[in-house]
Amino acid sequence: MTSTNLAYFSNDAIYACLVIFTIAFFSHTYEVSWAMKNVATNDKTEFDFSKTQRAGRIGTAMMTLGFIVLAVAVITRGFSAHRVPWGNMYEFSITGALMLTAAYLFAFAKYKVRWLGLPVSISVLLTLGTAITVLYRPSAPLVPALKSPWLAIHVLAAIISGGVFLVANLVAATFLIMERYELKGGRPAWAQRIPSLDSLDQLSYRLIAFVFPLWTFAIIAGAIWAESAWGKYWGWDPKETWAFITWVAYAAYLHARVTVGWRGRRAAWLCIFAGSTFLFNYIYVNIWGTGLHTYSGL
Amino acid sequence: MTINKSEVPDIGLTGLIRWAWRQLTSMRIALILLMLLGVAAIPGSLFPQRNQNPQKVDSYFTTDPTIAKWMDRLHLFNVYASPWFSAIYLLLFISLIGCVLPRTFHHLIAIGKKPPLTPRNLDRMEGYRVVSTDSEFALSVAKIWLKRHHFRVRVEGNSISAEKGYSRETGNLMFHLSLILILVGVALGSLFGMKGEAILNVGDRFINTPTSYDNITFGKFQGQGSLVPFSLTVNKFVATYDPVTSEPSNYVLTTSIANPIGTPAKPIIIKVNKPWTSGSTKVYLQANGYSPVVTVRNKAGNITFKGPIIFLPQDSNLSSLGAIKIPDMTPQIGFIASFIPTAGSSQARGIFSTYPEVLDPRLVLSAWQGNLGLDSGNPQSVYSLDTSAMKKIGLKALTLGSTYDFGLGSITFDGWKSWVNLQIVDDPGKMFALYGAIFAILGLLISLFTRQRRIWVKVGDGVEIAGLAKNGIPGLEEELTALSRVLSEAKGESE
Ligand code: HEM
């Protein structure tokens, strides 16, 4: 295939992903809403989950399929431009969506958190939708400043961290919603199968403890690259500044948990705050910010 | 932190200092300082910074001088060098040292020590359970199991106290000590480093002395004589562009460098991600652009100026803007000029550039006569013309090789050269920062993924076991369950 064909193929795969993740989203929604209906008609405290089991499985199958097709889309995009597919914000976005799905599948395999599929599929759909409509750019070679092995290392580490941060945020948000229900007298039927508050709390901590070193590494790799590209390993460029702020926020989260003993609601809010600094960096600084990083293009 | 009023008066000055020191080096204050550092970094990313974007700072001063003046007083245009930002990180630095050094000391002692004694009442500890088993074997079975699972074991009478995960604290300390190393590296760089820029046309020779630079700054303790004594000749510069998007795809600068001056020059290629290095000094390719070459003649036909003039790129297709100043004619002559590498034109925009490479160049000139203002004492930009005392006498777009007769003389568009902006940096601290960063990650990994816990086993009526997971790290339950299973199976064996 020629480069142009490959690029088109990649775009088609992204459209296919939009369909697949939409199915995943509806499957997960069905799983949830059926349980709700169940309680309305039967008014029981025990639920028959076997009816929604299949919808849930379809959801998981679609998430897996979506992951594979998205991976193909990202890889062919890279081949079409003869480089790693991280040259502009469109490419960061589709790779970010891929990493978010990967983080979900990892968390699902390890902790059986199928319910997370609902918020994850919405987030992936939103990311891919904005990517292909607003951020799309034709496939092209890299600008000289991006031509470096550090691009792959730094950006991959940052995108993986971002995916996991977002999943941790979704978990923390779920914690807050479930806690609210429980304080008001109990969870609704659809939320019965979401893990206990304690496990949600632990899960978001584990995810963050797992990627914090990787995020630290992403920043350091960025600094090493900046040293070879710009002559300065740290220049308080807006992107760097916000990466640092995110790092500080997560460091504060880990300290608050480990040394001060924060748990539950306060920890969840701190987690969400830290995750928001990451999103802010990605959205605001890339689009409206000025600085050396913006050459990566929208 | 609540200050108890009755506490303060009777502790005296040394007491007060000791109290303040204890507060400063407490985890809580360190955390607050850390958060504060994050918050303090924000304004610098929202407002333009003088060292990154001076033009934008100036525009704040022209649009609203009073507010800009106040912002300036609060150092909002220079956040990362401001007293308040420095104060936060200095305090954090001190806090870090005050916190980590004593802990390192304690840890070194603790490593050589046995685990603390088994507490009297195990039933108050985590995961407490009683396993019924044969008491004779239980203790040795537990000991073997614990040793195999990397616990440090202390047997005292009928009880075992075991602990593992000392490396958590080791990693933790390594991480925090590495942060100090990074800060030392940063400090060394800013005190003993130097940074400068030079713009050179292809063909120019650069000699590394302070006067050759367009701008140069030295660290506080860096002498001017300490520059690496090299000379560099710009032989060739090639930029390639993507024909579809017009984006640059490669820049290659070919130079010859003699280091030190006088030795035979070696050919060196410098690219954007490939600086030339000598010791802790590096030479980077930063930016590039075009210098149109012109010849200006007076009415008599004598050359009053000849050569390339550096123009600044204005857009991604490298339309470039500059000023040509001829002080040696009477009246003085100046041109505001734009260089268009590949000309296109439209009704709405006039002449503009359609591609960054030079394929069909134009030099668009507006000619002025009068006083260039060079003697006024005010520093002037070489890229713009001060037309306050001048009069416009004509406008012309030149193709390559053509000449414009502006009445008082003529100007010929002879050709063009590329220029490159070299950034030359000496940062003797960066290796410290790099090693600090590597050790910080290693320490972080060790400390985050080591599980520190204690397990106690006490033999009496049945075997009591319990544990303590430091910092509530999960996994203790599983380990206790595994141990109790081993113990209850051991009973089967002895029967
Ligand atoms: C500057 C950024 C800092 C970062 C990113 C950071 C990061 C961390 C992390 C990730 C841990 C968790 C290790 C564990 O699980 O035990 C930790 C623990 C700790 N940090 Fe920091 N730290 C920073 C600054 C400080 C400062 C300034 C102090 C001292 C005043 C400090 C004192 C401690 C102590 C005492 C622990 C051990 C807590 C314990 O295990 O009980 N840290 N730090």
Image (tube, rainbow, N blue to C red):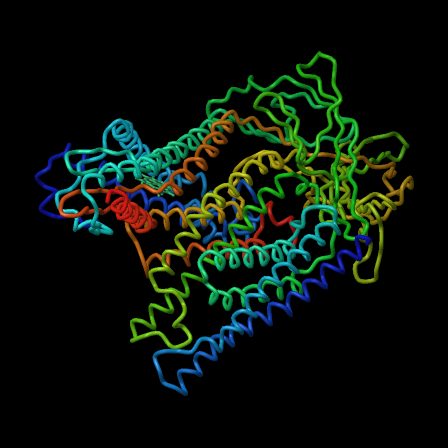
- Residue visible at 56% across and 42% down in the picture: B52
- The residue lying toward the viewer, choosing from A73 and B494, is B494
Q: Relative to B149, is B431 on the left or the right?
A: right
Task: Indicate whether A96 appears above or below B389.
Answer: below
- Residue at the limit of the structure toward the bottom, as seen here: A41
- The residue lying toward the viewer, choosing from B351 and B228, is B228
Position in image of residue A242 (x %, y %): 49, 49
Q: Relative to B253, is A47 on the left or the right?
A: left
Q: Relative to B145, is A25 on the left or the right?
A: right
Q: Is residue B28 visible?
A: no
The mark total stands at 0
Q: Relative to A208, is A16 on the left or the right?
A: right
Position in image of residue B44 (x %, y %): 48, 47
- Residue at the limit of the structure toward the front, as seen here: B495
Q: Point out the image quarter for the C terminus of chain A.
A: bottom right
Task: Indicate whether B173 appears above or below A265.
Answer: above
Q: Point out the image quarter for the N terminus of chain A.
A: bottom right
Name the quadrant where ligand 1 sits.
top left
- The residue lying toward the viewer, choosing from A217 and B49, is A217
Tell me where residue A267 sits by quadrant. bottom left
Position in image of residue A117 (x %, y %): 51, 66
Position in image of residue A165 (x %, y %): 47, 54
Task: Indicate whether B259 appears above or below B54.
Answer: above
Tell me where residue A64 sits by quadrant. bottom right
Q: Is residue A30 visible?
A: yes
- Residue visible at 23% across and 36% down in the picture: B21
